Amino acid sequence: MLPEDPIFDAVGIMVWGLDVGIYDLMYSAWGWTIAEIVHFTGLCLLIGTVGMYDLRMMGLVRGLSLAALHRLVPFGVLGFVLSASTGFLFVVSTPDQYLYNPAWQTKMGLLALAGLNMVLFYLTASRRLKVLGPDDMPPLAARLFAGASLTLWLGVIAAGRVITAFRPPAWFWCAWCA
Amino acid sequence: MIDALAWIEQTRLSLFVREDFYAYFVLLIFHAWGMAFLVGGGIAVSLRVLGVASGTRLERFRGFFPVMWLGATLAAVSGLGLLAGYPAKALTNWVFALKFACLVAAALLVRQMARGAFPRAARGEAIPARARVMAAAALLLWLGGVAGGKMLLYTNTMLLTTD
């Protein structure tokens, strides 16, 4: 039995998924498996590019020009798009299992913080990095942004991995429900 | 072989992984982190050899190797824990061998690139075409390793020997 939810219409989302063919695609023989492979490939791309950039910006790896290394970041964006779009397919295919899931809500919260951290970084500390040489230690603010970024992305992964442990209705979070 | 798997399933470690609420998921988290660092580092090196971020010094990508080693260690230790919990699930599935083969081959290719292309780059020489082919192959193999890992969940013929 689904709750009175003033924001999300889980049944409506699922009906939409059925109408546009997402449901059939995901529940085809290899649909869910392929979506999971793409989801995790995106995650590896993100850690392999943004995560490695973060490690350099934290000062744990030296000898690489941050401005030049930033060319890896578009591949991280590609990874994020792969993960986010397949994540969307998962949610549309079985919305109640995600919307009211404590782990998924935590994951979305951490994702939002990672996004906010990125926006603040590009608005503030990123400008001062362009003049740094390959062996220079970035300023403290940049190191903190990088540490926060990596920690938040690892948090996103961890929360994602435990989604199946907190499945509704055994676990049920809905702070916005009546 | 089934007898050996059945014996593993009755060890205290195996029972703990299956019966403790947290154990299996903690192992899953560490496995994902480890794989992300191992495969992620491998992707970064391969992309660089293929010409992305060419303004950086290739040989200094060696700095990411400890991260990859850390990832490999985390993935291997947590992977052994997961394997202890459900040995029959993985060891009776050829996809598990495929996953392992892909990851080992990709890691060997990265080592080969580090021995061949890195010293050349340090001397200011161009990256040889052979290294670029290796990098492209490594990218595909890392992807194969990830794909194999995800497919394990959907291709196993048994979960426990008692099934």
Image (spheres, grey):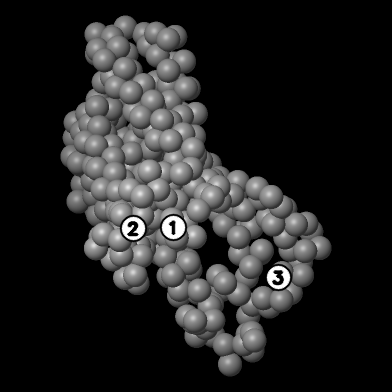
Q: Is residue B89 above or below residue B147?
A: below
Residue under disc 1 on the same chain as residue under disc 3 = no
Query: Residue beneath label 2, please?
Result: B9
Q: Chain of mark 2?
A: B
**Which image quadrant for residue B57?**
top left
Is the C-beta separation of discs 2 and 1 under 8 Å? Answer: yes
Q: Residues within 10 Å of mark 2 (few under 14, many from 20)?
A: many
Q: Is residue A146 visible?
A: no
Q: State the image coordinates of residue A163 (x, y, percent, origin top left).
A: 46, 66
Q: Earlier along the polypeptide chain: callout 2 or callout 1?
A: 2
Q: Residue at x 68, y 55 (%)?
A: A26
**Which image quadrant for residue A153?**
bottom left
Q: CA distance from mark 2 to mark 1?
A: 8 Å
Amino acid carrying label 2: it is: Glu
Q: State the image coordinates of residue A5 (x, y, percent, origin top left).
A: 63, 85
Q: CA distance from mark 3 to mark 2?
A: 42 Å
Q: Residue at x 68, y 78 (%)?
A: A9
Query: Residue beneath label 1, please?
Result: B160
Q: Residue at x 39, y 20 (%)?
A: B49
Marks 1, 3: nearer the viewer: 1
Q: Is residue A104 visible?
A: yes
Amino acid carrying label 3: it is: Ile
Query: Residue beneath label 3, please?
Result: A13
Q: Is residue A9 above or below residue B36?
A: below
Foreground residue, A36 or A119?
Answer: A36
